[in-house]
Image: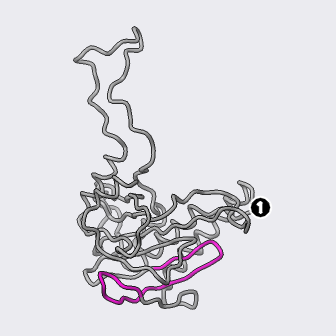
Amino acid sequence: METTDKSQGESATVLEGPEEEATAPDEAGGGAAPEEERPAPARPRRRVALDGFLAAPFPWYALDEAYTGPRRLHHIGQDADGTVQHGSLGHGDEPVVRADLGDADGPRERFAVVVTVGDSPVRRTADGTGVLEATSEASAAWLAGQGLLAVTWPAQMDHTLRDDWLEQQTETAWALADDLQGPAWSTLMLPVDGVSTPFHYRESEFGWVLAGSTPGGVHLGAYGRGLSAYGLGFAAVKDVAAYADQG
C-alpha cells in the first residue's frame, strides 16, 4: 500500500461549487480593469476537475449499465508532480456529513462511490527523499475506507467526540486495508466488464467497503450506504466527460 495514501486519502480537487468569475472589477472605480491588467478568465471548477480525469493514465471504472441512477465526478488524487494516481466517481445521492445517520426515522442516503487506483510500481517520491510502495488492492481498500469515514457522523456525537472517533476509525481502516486476508473481510464475487471477479468486502452500521483488481491491472475500491453491494457490477467508463454533465 502506498505510504503517502494515509495522509492524502481521497483529498484532491473539490468538484462542487459555482463557477468562478471570469474577470475582476476595478476596486478603485468599480468598473472593468484596463485591458492589460485584466486577469485571464478563470475556468469553472468542474472544468478543472474534468481535466484531471481526462489526464489520468489509466481507465476509470464505475457502476455498469445496470445502474440507471445519477452519476457524477467525485474526487481525483494527484502526486507532487501533478500525475493523477487515483480518483472516484459517485452514483446516487450526494453523500453528506451529518449526525443523524443513526436515526431510523430520518432520511437515508442511497449512494455508491467507485474508486479507481492506477497500477504504479515501487517508485521514489517527487522530492527524491523517500520511496512509495507499489499500488495494490490494499491501496483501493484504504481509499474506500477513508472515503466512507469522511461522510460518516454517528448519531448523538458532538464535534469533539466525532474528531476523536474519526481519528480512531481512520487508524482502524488503515490496519484493515493492510490485512485483506483477515477475518474482517469476506469474499464477494461481482462482475467487472462482464467477468466475475473476487472482491474483499466488509460492512458496518455506517456502510460497506470493497476492494479488488481488474484483469487490466487497475485496482478498484468502492464504498456506499443505502445501496446493497451484492447486486453491483463494474465497467470501464467510455466517456468520463459525461459524468461532468450529469453532476
Q: Secondary structure at mark 1?
A: loop
**Rendered-image quadrant of the C terminus:** bottom left
| Depicted 191 relative to depicted 105: above or below | below
The type of residue carrying mark 1 is: Gln
Q: What is the number of callouts on the image?
A: 1
Which residues fall within the magenta stretch?
190-210
Instruction: Kindly identify the residue that appears in the image at 47 percent across and 85 percent down.
Output: 200
Q: Percent position (x, y) of residue 216?
A: 25, 80
Q: In percent of the image, x 50 and y 79: which residue is there?
A: 229
- How far across and how far down the image is residue 150, in percent? 56, 61
Closer to us: 236 or 246: 246
The vertical placement of 77 against 202, above or below, is above
Residue at numbered disc 1: 156
**x 37%, y 15%: residue:** 26
User: Would residue 245 appear left or right of 156 to someone viewing this image?
Assistant: left
- Residue 237 higher or lower than 247, as above or below: below
Residue 203 pos. (x, y %): 58, 80
Look at 29% across and 81% down and name the residue there: 193
- Give the prevailing secondary structure in the magenta stretch: strand
* Snapshot colouring: one colour
Q: Quarter holding the N terminus?
A: bottom left
Camera-nearest residue between 62 and 152 = 62
Left or right: 94 as drawn, with respect to 23: right
- Horizontal side of 8 relative to 156 (left or right) equals left
Name, please, the residue furthest toward the right: 156
